[in-house]
Image: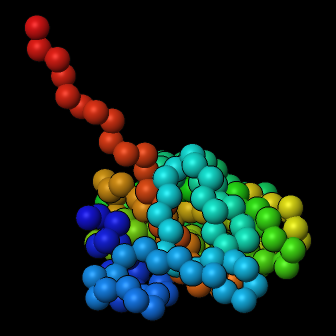
Amino acid sequence: MAVLVILLVVAALGFTGCEPAEGEGAGGGTTSTSDERGGKSGDVEGRIGEEVIVGNATITVRALETTFQPAMPEQRLSGQSPPAPDSGESFYQAYVRVKNTGVAPIRVDAEDFVCAVGESVVGIEPTRSGPLPRSLLKNASLDLILTFKAQAGFEPVLVYRPPWYDGTVVITAESERDTTTTTR
């Protein structure tokens, strides 16, 4: 349910996914179709730590968490001084690897990622995110550090809308562990 709400918020901000496939009911859902290049399209959901196949690429989010002191990438998107969080704000940081598994190059840009935190969707903090955009040839990968500044106290959800893929990728935290206890 939370992922559905996030997708609706992202769609309202202009990060829309693909249209329903032919023959699909008005209820929508996750779609997946082949295009002329042999890639896939449609909205994809994944979890932290799992490899997600998106068209001719794989995306792995190794971490997505709140941090008081975020790590700084060697090559930041902005050379300005990094701002401190305001009262009631926190940093959320993601470690992402994108690998091109197809023949055609793909462009990876940190600014194609947003983070849904509570009721808001925020873009990256360029002074604490990087590296700069790159085109990846077959079997090349890029490791990104993405930092977001938003209201504290929420579980972040990473949303990726790459221009080379017709759909939206939503990465959430691991499913909640079974919290049932055994009584003796």
Q: Position of residue 147 (x, y in %)?
A: 56, 62
Quick check: can you spot residue 17?
Answer: yes
Which residue sits at x=66%, y=86%?
35
Q: Position of residue 95 (x, y in %)?
A: 62, 54
Which residue sits at x=63%, y=81%?
34
Which residue sits at x=79%, y=65%?
101
Position of 62 relative to 23 (above/below): above
Q: Position of residue 25 (x, y in %)?
A: 31, 86
Q: Residue 16 sits in which quadrant?
A: bottom left
- What's the colour scheme? rainbow
Q: Position of residue 89 (x, y in %)?
A: 37, 61
Q: Quadrant of the C terminus?
A: top left
Along the horizontal axis of the image, is 164 left or right of 140? left
Quick check: can you spot residue 122?
Answer: no
Which residue sits at x=80%, y=61%?
141
Along the horizontal axis of the image, is 84 left or right of 98? left
Q: How many marks?
A: 0
Along the horizontal axis of the image, is 95 left or right of 68? right
In the rendered image, the residue lying farthest to the front is: 23
Of the pair 108 and 168, the residue shown nearer to us: 168
Q: Quadrant of the N terminus?
A: bottom left
Position of 181 relative to 126 (above/below): above
Q: Residue 130 sits in which quadrant?
A: bottom right
In the rendered image, the residue lying farthest to the left is: 184
Position of 145 relative to 66 (above/below): below
